[in-house]
Image: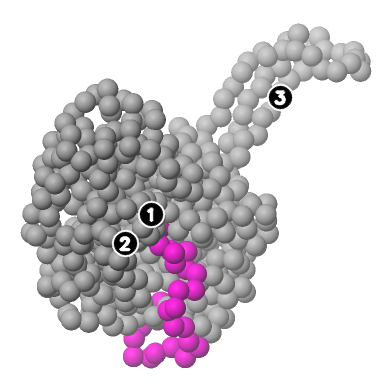
Amino acid sequence: MSQTAAGTPSGIETTGTPDETVPTIEHWIDGASVAGRGERTGPVYDPARGVVQKRVHFADVADVATAVEVAARAFETWRDVSIAKRQQIMFAFRELLNARSGELAAILTSEHGKVLGDAQGEIARGLEVVELACAMPGYTKGEYSENVSTGIDVYTLRQPLGVVGVISPFNFPAMVPLWFFPIAIAAGNTVVLKPSEKDPSAAVWLARLMQEAGLPDGVLNVVHGDRVAVDALLEHPTVRAISFVGSTPIAKHIYDTASANGKRVQALGGAKNHMLVLPDADLDLAADAAVNAGFGSAGERCMAVSVVLAVDTVADELVAKVRERMSRLTTGDGTRGTDMGPLITREHRDRVAGYVDVAAADGATVVVDGRDPQVDGEPGGFWLGPTLVDRVPVSSSVYRDEIFGPVLSIVRVEGYEAGLDIINASRWGNGTAIFTNDGGAARRFQREATVGMIGVNVPIPVPVAYHSFGGWKESLFGSAKSYGPHGFDFYTQEKAVTSRWLDPSHGGIDLGFPRHD
């Protein structure tokens, strides 16, 4: 994820005097919009026009404490709501979200810039996790062992933690919150969600929809802001767990700080995802996949393919096919049917564009330069067209850094072993893919690649909701992945009960250590 995915200071101006000419996005606490006591606000841009369309209130420490206190009070009653009732609310939320996904997609496009089709796809993947949360009874039941010792039974209970914090990034303002809060709430917890300050409206929209579905006030709360709000969540003693998706440096900060404060932590970090193309691969399929995975959502995906490892014997042909497909892509306003929208902010656009200069200086070949694109949109938008850089040396920062934009690098390798070595040497281990028609090579790859999510002729191997999402190495801090079985394990704590119901034959005193006879 990007360096500012958690809402840390990023050069975006804040002020204590809101612009009254644009609407202000408020916090959502105890089932209502709340301005809070924090005086700072930040701009929310329309990336396709390059103008401030809204402002968002930033929470101070006291605002976060208020939200946590509300969530703690709500937990005392929500934890005792029956499984059947919680399940009914999740089913109702699922139906509302499915019926009104167009509203949410429009919000995503207006604040993030991704095209409407991509926004709908994001919602669909989040909806999968909501559907998983509807199956909560099967994931939160315990186990029972009868007569482990004469007249004694042992069974386990899965119980909620309490108040949990969710900190989500700008690039998936709907999907990532949906990875976490439905499972947390279905399992009986209450939630304080801190979305990215760059595109915060989706979080409030989801909270309102949960209320409409029947969720009691205070179970899901939303606070906006930057690092002040983040650190307040990490350090608050009542918050039992933290779920986070963002860049590697921030993920490490989240993990270290929350762990030091005695919390469970899901901290998913950044990525540099490779796609290895072997000589026997279907090069048309590989070229399509490289373009789709490299430039979807303007490359602002933690699972984007940013590096294609092309075996020398097919590299020239593959680059030509990728370049031809790129020539057909359109860039512009996401509401106009274009293929790719703008980047999230001007600062981020300029940072990503700077890597094209770095590539040339490091000896790479800029095959397609997207710095001055033809766009179907306003000239002030944060535009950067699809960019292709060939013969990138692995010593270049273009290869080493998580660029998080529409820059696709080609690294040429001698063969399978050389490509695998590069993948395994990476400090990240989020996702990777191999394109081949050789089953033996594919089987070796899935065993030998030190990466958490593997694609075989699939460029973006994001698991379905009933499996869990998460990488290895610096792409995941701790061991807790998101959603799937890991999600339910994370948001519940197990209690073991050893039980004996006395009968008329009991009696006697025995001071010896208990044994299972």
Which residue bears the numbered disc 3? 498
Q: Residue drawn 25% across and 58% down?
A: 364
Q: Earlier in the sequence, mark 2 or mark 3?
A: 2
- The magenta span reads 1-28
Image coordinates of residue 97 in percent, x first then y, are 30, 55
Hey, what amino acid is under mark 1? Ser
Q: Residue at x 46, y 42 (%)?
A: 472
Which residue carries the number 2 mark? 362
Question: In the figure, is residue 465 to the left or right of 160?
Answer: left
Q: Are marks 2 and 1 in contact (CB under 8 Å)?
A: yes
Q: Amino acid at mark 3?
A: Thr
Q: Specify whether 148 is left or right of 185.
A: right
Q: Is residue 164 magenta?
A: no
Q: Disc 2 and disc 1: Cα gap in Å?
A: 9 Å
Q: Amino acid at mark 2?
A: Asp
Query: In the rendered image, which residue does mark 1 sit on?
Result: 395
Quarter of the figure with residue 69: bottom right
The first of marks 3 and 1 along the sequence is 1
User: Quick check: marks 2 and 3 in contact, CB under 8 Å?
Assistant: no
Q: Nearer the viewer, residue 189 or 108?
A: 108
Could you give the CA–CA distance between mark 3 and mark 1, rounded to whole angstroms?
59 Å
